[in-house]
Amino acid sequence: MSISLELTSAAADGRHTFFKLAFAIGVMVAGLEIGYLLHSPLPYDPVGYLVGRDFANTWVGAQLALTGHPQTYFAADAYNRLLAEKFGASYPLHIWSYPPHVLLFTWPLALMPYMAAYILYCALGLAVYLAVTSAGGRRLDHLVLLAIAPAVIVNIWCGQNGFFVAALLAGGLMVLDRRPILAGLLFGMLSIKPQLGILLPLMLALTGRWRTVLAAATTVLLLVTAASFVFGVDVWTAYINDAMPVQSRVFLREFENFMTHMPTAFMNARVAGLPLPAAAGLQIGVSLAVIGAVMWTFWHRRDADLSNALLLTAAFLVTPYAFNYDMVVFGPMITKLMDRDGNTPLDYGLMLAVWALPVLTVALGIAAIPLSFLPLAGLAARLLWRLQRAKIPATGRSEVGNACVAVTP
């Protein structure tokens, strides 16, 4: 009895220590964001970007959507000429990188001034993210961490869509068992950020969730059809011929400032100065290992919480193109894992490293220490070790969906 109480007390102490450290990191990053805003000549920041930086793409894209012919500006030269007309001749370089069907959702933002649209976008995104990932729970510690995660602050700073991406991915996993068609709808909408959903078809096939696969494929088809109807079929040829080649130039180090925001093996290798073939070879090796890990994990029923954590971590390791602001989705995963019995200092340390990674990625990149993918690789390896040691459920289906983001009341 005394041993059990000691173990329970040790687990509680570990959770409390992790919460305090994670909260402190979040407060520090939030302070940096507040300082950035206080020193910004709104609506511009101290270095000439509009506050919200990437939100300029979303807002201008919304305006282009209302013209009915956004594809005219998918090419980098035409797009940056447009930005120069709107924001000044010296406005920093931007590229258009979103699939055309994202414009079906963002066009109302064009009806507002820039700052009003940016504030609404961030506030609405945060509200949706918290509503979905809290799963109706009232755990104050979870809600606090979800709201102040470094990835949340970085996402606001960048004016990116990480809130909505996290809601789609986490929301789909939440309802996967109870409402497989809705899960498929959410996964299909995740095609606005397709690189983060690469492993979903593999997981769904291994777990036999064919209704979800069909619903996701149907959703993607409907979105493509709707975009083609609204903007014309040539919106897709323009995206493929004009927008995608510009994105591929990131791999050639033409936009190195973008690369420092990506905690992937390939981008770390490129920032380190490795030639393209060597960086590609490293990424291929990591990707193959990750795919093998996901196949092993979902081939049989295993611990559901750990399985989902492995899937989300693998989603960032398998692709060479993932940004730190996309890591909002790690918030609910980590708040779920922190409550598990059996966590060791190593587990909390790895979770804390991944928690801080959205900011560390930039700091390491600027310092020319391109090792930001290692915390993700370390966490994936540790999760595999824990999955191998965890008991496989004797009966019933692995609750893949509920495990990732459910909050204990």
Image: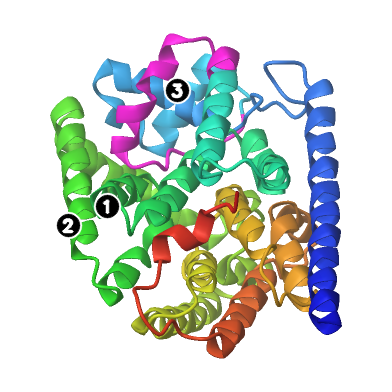
Is residue 319 magenta-colored? no
Mark 1, secondary structure of its residue? helix
Question: For the residue labelled by badge 2, is the local secondary structure a helix, a strand or a loop?
Answer: helix
Q: In the rendering, at what x and y percent does residue 265 appear?
A: 58, 72
Asked if disc 3 and disc 1 are in contact, CB closer than 8 Å, the reply is: no
Mark 3 highlights which residue? 60
Residue at 56% from the left image edge and 44% from the top image edge: 134
Q: Point out residue 256 in the picture as x, y percentages from the top left corner.
A: 63, 54
Pick the front one: 239 or 13: 13
In the image, residue 248 sits, relative to residue 274, either above or below, namely above
Q: With 231 as the anchor, is 84 left or right in this view?
A: right
- Residue that badge 2 annotates: 214
The answer to whether mark 1 and mark 2 are in CB contact below 8 A is: yes
- Dot 2 surroundings within 10 Å: few (below 14), some, or many (20 or more)? some
- The range drawn in magenta is 92-117
**SS majority, magenta:** helix
Which numbered disc, 3 or 2, marks the residue that appears first in the sequence? 3
Cα distance between the residues tagged 3 and 1: 30 Å
Residue type (three-letter) at the residue carrying disc 3: Val
Residue identified by numbered label 1: 184
Quarter where residue 388 is shown: bottom right
Q: Secondary structure at mark 3?
A: helix
- Mark 3 crowd level (few <14, some 14–19, many ≥20, 10 Å Cα): many
Q: Amino acid at mark 2?
A: Leu
Name which quarter of the figure residue 380 lies in.
bottom right
Of labels 3 and 1, earlier in sequence is 3
Percent from the top left, x then y, of residue 157?
A: 67, 35
Q: Is residue 101 magenta?
A: yes
Residue for point 37% across, 52% down = 175
The residue carrying pointer 1 sits among few (fewer than 14), some (14 to 19) or many (20 or more) residues within 10 Å by Cα, namely many
Please name the residue shown 63% across and 29% down the image: 52
Q: Which label's residue is closer to the chain start, 1 or 2?
A: 1
